[in-house]
Each structure stands twice: as structure tokens, then as C-alpha cells.
Image (cartoon, rainbow, N blue to C red):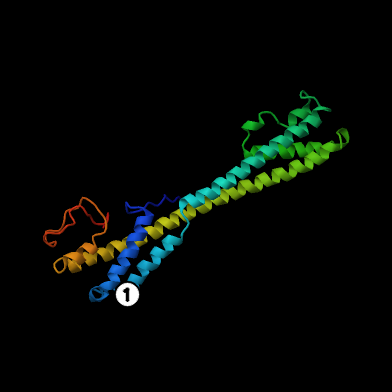
Amino acid sequence: MYSTEKKTNFKISYAELSMLSHQSYDTIMRDITEFEHFGISSNEVEALKSQAEELDNTPKDEELQGVVMDITISKNEIAEQVRMLIRKSTTFIKLVYNPSTGVYKSLDVESLSRKNDYELYNTAFGVVRISRLKADDFSPNLQDVATELEAAANQLLQKKKERHFAIQNRDIATQARVELANSLYSKLSKLTSLGREIWIEQDEAKYNDYVIYGSSQKKPDNSPPNSEDQDQEELPNG
């Protein structure tokens, strides 16, 4: 089944989300007696902290992309080696079969620079097959080159698969990180919203402790008077 890419349900960075979660954990634990009165146990607050720590320990997309980039560079270097060995092999083959012959044309070695990785892999093994099938026609040195070409082509295929799996792993990890961050944000939003409700008519300073992110939302009509949070805002979507 086709699955659409998951999006974050908040507008702050992962780093800001983590920082706010850790800060809010300390604040909520300070006020845990009041939260327990509304059915929020310390275990639920600990879950907020645990998820924040889990988010801290998940690999960033830049790290995963770096892995893909390194594999891609290595793959491209191997592909160039394959092209070089194909050209070297065809130099031996052209000494026996000129480019107008069916044998040479069957190698399909024109425009090597425009061939994709799989096309290059198939071309390499075609050259290896001809080199061995007609080994008696060629210099013995061609067999050494063909063996080297076969190994390089296999490396190219393996690196191509490695890159494919690295891209898959990046996609999976990215989606898992979005889900984790969304879950963390939901918990943070719920708890800080309750914190504001608890202190809204009792303690301005403590109320402000739970106003942790800016937006253009208006203050509630019953917010503490003379509050200095005009330029502060609540969590987005909170």
C-alpha cells in the first residue's frame, strides 16, 4: 500500500523541541503535586523525558545523508574503474576484431560515460564473456584484465545495492524520527497546557514557566494581570 510521507505537527526544530521538553520536565516535576491532582503521574512525566532522550539519540538526517553520499562517492569511483578496464579490454579485442565486426559490436562499449550503473555492469560482463569465450584469439594478458574487470563489476553491483539500502534506511529512520518527535510534541503540548491552566489564576511566574514558545495567539482573558509575556507565545498547535 502506498504510504504518504509523514510530516511534523510542530513548527520548531528538533533541537528546540528537545530543549523545551527537558526544561519542561524539570518544571513539571517541581509542580508534580499539582499535576497529580489532575491525574498526571510522575511516570507520565518521566515518559516525556525518556522520549526527549530518545530523540536526542536518534541519528540526524544530515548524518544519514552523509552515509549515502560517502557510498555514492565510492560507487562512482568503482564505476570509473570499470570504464577504464572495459576500455583496456577492448584495446586488446580490437587487435583481433575491428569495430565493424559483429563480435566487437556485440560488446556495446560505445558511450560508456552515459551508461548507468546497471548498464555498465552488464557491458562489463559482456566484455568478460567474449574475452573468455574467444581466449585463444587474444593475448594472454587480456585474461588478467578480464579477471580484474569482473571483480570491479561485482564491486560496483554490491556498492549499488549498498547505496539502495542506505537510502531505504535513511527514509525509514527519518519517518521514525518524525513519529517520535510528533509523539513528544503532543505530550509536551498537553502537559504545558495543563501547567498554564493550573497556575493561570494563582501564580504569574509559574504560569509563565509553561508559556514556552511564541505564536501570535492572544493571552486568555483570565491570564495573570501585568504579565510580561506579550512577546511570548504558546507552542504551535498547542
| Percent x, y of residue 7 | 37, 51
As drawn, the residue found furthest toward the top would be 100
Q: Is residue 93 above or below residue 17?
A: above
- Identify the residue position indicated by label 1 in the image: 42
Q: Amino acid at mark 1?
A: Ser
| Percent x, y of residue 87 | 73, 32
193 with respect to 152 (left or right):
left
Q: The C terminus lies in which quarter of the figure?
A: bottom left
Q: Hey, which quadrant is residue 134 in on the image?
A: top right
Give the SS element for disc 1. Answer: helix
16 with respect to 232 (left or right):
right
Q: Residue at x 31, y 69 (%)?
A: 26
Q: Is residue 49 above or below residue 144?
A: below
Q: Is residue 157 above or below residue 185?
A: above
| Percent x, y of residue 2 | 45, 50
53 with respect to 138 (left or right):
left
Q: Residue at x 52, y 51 (%)?
A: 168
Q: Residue at x 77, y 23 (%)?
A: 100
Q: Nearer the viewer, residue 201 or 158?
A: 201
